[in-house]
Image (cartoon, rainbow, N blue to C red):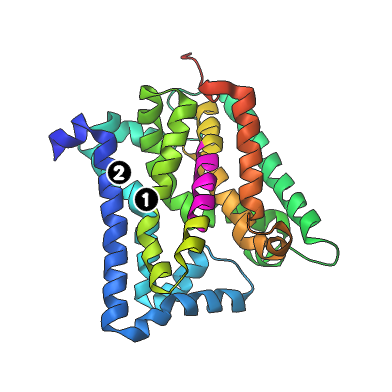
């Protein structure tokens, strides 16, 4: 295993992340089949979160998982890429564990302070602008900040806290952008590397789709949703890749982007979804931002030259 991790670190990481996610879903399906009552766990979670006036995040999921331990599988699934990255790095793959953990600093191993500060300020500005866009689409008379105020007492504090409470951004990104991204862009032009990582990120989610298929979703509709989600994952990879590059390899910008856009979708999207139609507003915003970044930054996606 150690030799494989060092020789093929990206493949070892991906197979392990996929295996962890698949094991969680296999266990979930087994419980659903052998204990039909357990099938109500996820609907009950959604109902409880809706009743609380909040959105789905680490805190609200944990509160319900304490009552129903089956829901802790959500955390294991989401953390699978980071767990896999830590294991493969500990075995010497991808530059080793020390380098992976160095990417948890606000400025990465290849970073410079000034570009990083500009990048973080820019991310906060885009995040705030997203709120304004949602507010505009939602229309007059609609309050979009209620569940975020519950997090921090005010919309601003709640929105900042929410960046770090999203299970996707916080639990996944050490794997995707901390481990896989540096390996991919060392082998390919960063823009191509982002497209590849976007496809890998999308495919890693497929094990969870067994629940949708078991629920009886029409396959053409399922395929359409998957196509939209693939576009979202590629756009996310372009934006995250650029942001990480501008900080010299820090994972935090990816957590901001992944978590922040999920906040747009989960905390605000319910108000704007009817207006945005099939393509949810988060996807539309990310695609536009990704196109602008690709046009301005080019194939390098803002990768810094060595200091």
Specify the quadrant of the image occupied by residue 286.
top right
Can residue 234 be seen by looking at this rendering? yes
**In this rendering, would 259 be left or right of 179?**
right
Say whether marks 2 and 1 touch (CB < 8 Å): yes
Q: From the viewer's side, name the closer residue of 80 and 27.
A: 27
Can residue 96 be seen by looking at this rendering? no
- Residue 143 among those drawn in magenta: no
Q: Which mark is residue 14?
A: 2
Query: Sequence-wise, which precedes: disc 2 or disc 1?
Result: 2
- Residue 226 among those drawn in magenta: yes
Looking at the rendered image, the quarter that the N terminus falls into is top left
Read off the residue under disc 1: 204
Relative to 301, say whether 212 is above or below. below
**In this rendering, would 2 be left or right of 110?**
left
- Residue 58 place in picture, x, y as percent: 48, 62
Q: From the viewer's side, name the closer residue of 295 and 9.
A: 295
Residue occupying the point 62% across, 30% down? 293
Range drawn in magenta: 225-237
Chief secondary structure of the magenta portion: helix
């Amino acid at each position: 295993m150690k030799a494989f991790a060092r020789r093929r670190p990206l493949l070892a990481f991906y197979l392990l992340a996929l295996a962890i996610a698949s094991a969680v879903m296999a266990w979930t399906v087994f419980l659903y089949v052998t204990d039909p009552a357990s099938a109500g766990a996820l609907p009950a979670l959604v109902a409880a979160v809706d009743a609380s006036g909040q959105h789905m995040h680490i805190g609200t999921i944990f509160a319900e998982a304490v009552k129903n331990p089956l829901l802790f599988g959500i955390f294991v699934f989401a953390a699978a890429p980071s767990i896999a990255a830590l294991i493969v790095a500990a075995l010497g793959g991808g530059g080793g564990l020390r380098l992976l953990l160095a990417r948890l600093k606000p400025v990465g191993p290849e970073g410079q302070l000034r570009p990083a500060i500009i990048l973080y300020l820019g991310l906060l500005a885009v995040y705030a602008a997203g709120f304004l866009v949602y507010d505009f689409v939602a229309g007059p008379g609609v309050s979009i900040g209620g569940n975020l105020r519950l997090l921090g007492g005010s919309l601003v504090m709640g929105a900042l806290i929410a960046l770090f409470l999203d299970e996707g951004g916080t639990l996944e990104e050490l794997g995707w952008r901390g481990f896989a991204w540096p390996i991919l862009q060392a082998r390919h032009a960063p823009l191509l590397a982002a497209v590849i990582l976007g496809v890998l990120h999308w495919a890693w989610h497929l094990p969870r789709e067994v629940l949708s298929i078991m629920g009886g979703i029409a396959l053409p509709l399922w395929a359409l949703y998957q196509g939209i989600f693939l576009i979202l994952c590629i756009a996310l990879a372009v934006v995250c890749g650029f942001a990480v590059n501008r900080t010299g390899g820090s994972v935090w910008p990816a957590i901001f982007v992944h978590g922040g856009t999920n906040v747009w979708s989960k905390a605000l999207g319910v108000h704007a979804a009817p207006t945005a139609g099939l393509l949810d507003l988060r996807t539309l915003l990310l695609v536009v931002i990704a196109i602008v970044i690709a046009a301005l930054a080019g194939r390098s996606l803002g990768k810094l030259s060595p200091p």
